[in-house]
């Protein structure tokens, strides 16, 4: 089984518990206004690799991951369902903790993927249909399907939400988010991530218009204030 990956980070510290090998996979249906990885949108934009080759790369660092593991990010890892199941199986056969950093929008097969997943780190783009479409360009149908599978299988869940000036940086939104999260039973952690400009230069290199041109980075002090409402 072969798949497409953008890059790998052997010593990731923010993509799950402990020290982790992070695999950034190619392909994504969403076109989020604040996406900072536009180079991962197209499936064939990265390196083609077999699950066995990728596992061998991961195992070189296995001794460092006693309290960590492997995280599959993107792009959107759920877009490559067969390859993802294959590499997840191989990781579990080697006693590696597995995590998905995902927006929850793939092409199905979610139950089998989750069978080999220890932790789901899920991006909350918005909590109602209108705002979700505005931010991502798609409806919430596939996201809701994935979230339902996560809840049904009682998978450990971390939630993340990017806070963008002028879009969702209000007390009202955070209180709505809090109410939304209360209906999800298996949440262990919630993070508000500040909008940043790290990906802007990539848009210039790829000759793509940046949707939030002129929007300033999120103020970190305001993020701390908003966190209190959670």
Image (cartoon, helix red, strand yellow):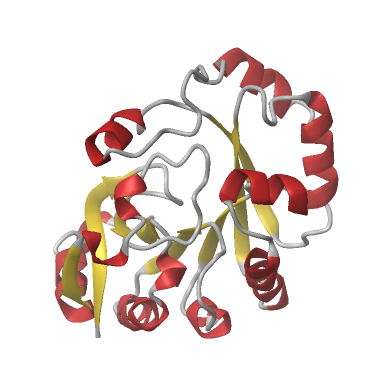
Relative image position of residue 6 (x, y in whole percent): 24, 56
**In screen coordinates, is 186 left or right of 3?**
right
Q: How many marks?
A: 0
Relative image position of residue 230 (x, y in whole percent): 77, 34
Residue name at image x 72 percent, y 77 percent: 152
User: Residue 36 versus residue 180: which sits nearer the camera?
Assistant: 36
Q: In this picture, is 52 found above or below 122?
A: below
**In screen coordinates, is 131 left or right of 102?**
right
User: Residue 76 versus residue 152: which sits nearer the camera?
Assistant: 76
Q: In this picture, is 105 found above or below 73?
A: below
Residue name at image x 24 percent, y 86 percent: 1
Relative image position of residue 98 (x, y in whole percent): 42, 67
Relative image position of residue 75 (x, y in whole percent): 39, 56
User: Residue 167 versus residue 67: which sits nearer the camera?
Assistant: 167
Q: Quadrant of residue 56?
A: bottom left
**In screen coordinates, is 215 left or right of 54?**
right
Q: In this picture, is 229 found above or below 39?
A: above
Q: In this picture, is 201 found above or below 33?
A: above
Residue name at image x 54 percent, y 80 percent: 108
Residue name at image x 38 percent, y 74 percent: 80
Q: Quadrant of residue 121?
A: bottom right
């Amino acid at each position: 089984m072969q798949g497409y990956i953008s890059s790998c980070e052997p010593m990731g510290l923010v993509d799950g518990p402990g020290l982790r090998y992070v695999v950034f996979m190619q392909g994504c249906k969403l076109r989020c206004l604040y996406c900072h990885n536009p180079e991962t949108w197209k499936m064939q934009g990265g390196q083609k690799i077999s699950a066995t080759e990728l596992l061998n790369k991961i195992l070189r660092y296995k001794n460092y991951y006693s309290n960590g593991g492997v995280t599959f990010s993107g792009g959107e890892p759920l877009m490559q369902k067969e390859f993802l199941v294959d590499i997840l199986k191989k990781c579990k056969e080697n006693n590696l903790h597995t995590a998905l950093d995902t927006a929850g929008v793939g092409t199905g097969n979610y139950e089998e993927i989750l069978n080999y997943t220890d932790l789901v780190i899920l991006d909350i783009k918005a909590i109602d249909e209108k705002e979700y479409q505005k931010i991502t360009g798609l409806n919430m149908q596939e996201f809701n399907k994935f979230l339902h599978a996560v809840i049904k299988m009682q998978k450990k869940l971390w939630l993340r939400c990017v806070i963008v000036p002028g879009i969702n940086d209000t007390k009202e939104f955070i209180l709505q988010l809090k109410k939304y999260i209360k209906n999800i039973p298996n949440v262990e952690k919630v993070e508000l991530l500040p909008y940043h400009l790290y990906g802007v230069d990539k848009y210039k290199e790829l000759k793509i218009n940046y949707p939030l041109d002129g929007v300033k980075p999120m103020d970190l002090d305001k993020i701390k204030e908003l966190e209190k409402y959670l």
